[in-house]
Image (cartoon, helix red, strand yellow):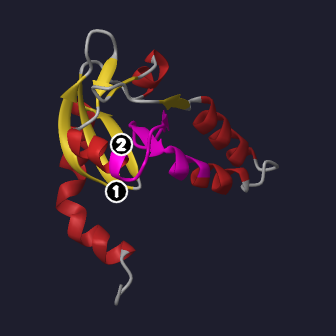
Amino acid sequence: MFYGEYIHSIDRKGRLILPSKFREAAKGNFVERFFVTRGLDTCLFMFSEEEWRSQEQKFKAISFTKQESRIFNRLYFSGAVDVIPDRQGRILLPQYLKDFAQIKKDVVVVGVSNRIEIWASEKWQEFYGTWRQSFEEIAEKVIEPGS
């Protein structure tokens, strides 16, 4: 549903304008509410409400008797906030999430199919620079033959 890479900025009120392609995709799929939380690799994950509920069911099924599971769920769910874009497609990112992702002003908003990732521009450049040369090698490891 969400694809592409877009450069945006956080405005002086702390809001992020979602890329128009993402707003169109959300509207076409009747998505009004999103959930944003701490992601992996120092970015934020943003899910449609439906996808969030699906992820929530998976993570709730993880045994809470395992310490790693408790830690992950605490950090993941305690960081979550629901957001509804305004008429201009802006969302307000809480300061604690911006701090987690090291976001100051410039961001890269990345569509990763069922989720949106929000990266500090510098962190995205660092990630992309590190992994782009390994793209084909990684593909060979993670994509099953005949897929």
Quarter of the C terminus within the rendering: bottom left
Residue 125 in picture, x, y percent from top left: 19, 39
Q: Which residue is at a point 61% across and 34% down the rendered structure image?
A: 75
| Nearer to the camera, 42 or 17 | 17
Q: Amino acid at mark 1?
A: Met
Quarter of the N terminus within the rendering: bottom left
- Side of 48 where 72 appears, left or right: right
Residue 101 sits above or below residue 138 on the image: above
Q: In the image, which residues are magenta?
A: 27-53
Residue 25 in picture, x, y percent from top left: 31, 50
Residue 94 sits above or below residue 120 on the image: above
Q: Secondary structure at mark 1?
A: loop
Disc number placed over residue 12 in the picture, else none = none
- Side of 69 where 19 appears, left or right: left
Disc number placed over residue 117 in the picture, else none = 2
Residue 138 in picture, x, y percent from top left: 30, 68
Question: How far is the residue under mark 1 from the one under mark 2?
Answer: 13 Å
Q: Quadrant of residue 139?
A: bottom left
Q: Amino acid at mark 2?
A: Glu
Residue 54 in picture, x, y percent from top left: 59, 55
Q: Residues within 10 Å of mark 2 (few under 14, many from 20)?
A: many
Q: Secondary structure at mark 2?
A: strand
Q: Which residue is at a point 29% across and 18% down the rendered structure image?
A: 104
- Side of 57 where 114 appears, left or right: left
Residue underneath mark 1: 1
| Nearer to the camera, 123 or 108 | 108
Residue 62 sits above or below residue 11 on the image: below
Does 50 lie within the magenta span? yes
Question: Mark 2 and mark 1 in contact (Cβ < 8 Å)?
Answer: no
